[in-house]
Amino acid sequence: MTSHASFPPLPGIASADRRVRHVFLRDLVLAASVGVWPHERGRTQRVRINLDLAVAEPASPVPDQHDAVVCYDRIAAAVRQLVAAGEHVQLIETLAERIATVALADPRILRARIRVEKLDVYPDAASVGVEIERTR
């Protein structure tokens, strides 16, 4: 049996010591115009989007005010708007990169992990997709 080495904590992991919290959006299902194959053009297909955003916390306690935090409602609205814009994207990798760019526009977000999955590609698989992680 081999032993596994300990890995140092990642800077994006939620931590009181590093003052990082995570804001997430799980299982957002949208109709997207995406795909490289001819049968994928001119129609939409279901994609599931997950975001995990590592957010820098201020040095002092966060006040109990909406504008003091990264707002998941604004993030969700931006992702919906991006996908609904109607521009066909060939690769879900491209869609994931665009979502990461939108998320990282907020300077408090240190790291964005984005997963995009096509839900209806294979009848014997729940999904196919890609997950990317980007840092500022």
Image (cartoon, rainbow, N blue to C red):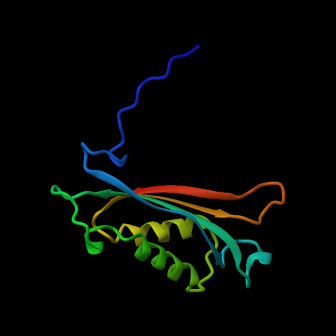
> Number of numbered discs present?
0
Residue at 31% across, 45% down: 15
Q: Is residue 31 above or below residue 68?
A: below
The residue most toward the top is 1
Q: Is residue 70 above or below residue 41?
A: above
In the rendered image, residue 29, in percent from the top left (x then y), is placed at 63, 70
Quarter holding the N terminus? top right
Residue at 30% across, 73% down: 66
Residue nearer the viewer, 22 or 97? 22
The residue most toward the front is 64
Describe residue 19's horizontal placement relative to residue 100 as left or right.
Answer: left
Visible residue check, residue 80:
yes
Q: Quadrant of residue 103?
A: bottom left
In the rendered image, residue 85, in percent from the top left (x then y), is placed at 55, 86
In the rendered image, residue 120, in percent from the top left (x then y), is placed at 76, 66
The residue most toward the right is 123
Q: Is residue 99 above or below residue 54?
A: below
Describe residue 94's horizontal placement relative to residue 66 as left or right.
Answer: right
Residue at 24% across, 42% down: 17
In the rendered image, residue 116, in percent from the top left (x then y), is placed at 59, 63
Residue at 69% across, 58% down: 128
Q: Is residue 108 above or below residue 73?
A: above
Visible residue check, residue 135:
no
Quarter holding the C terminus? bottom left
Residue nearer the viewer, 16 or 96? 16
Describe residue 26's horizontal placement relative to residue 71 as left or right.
Answer: right
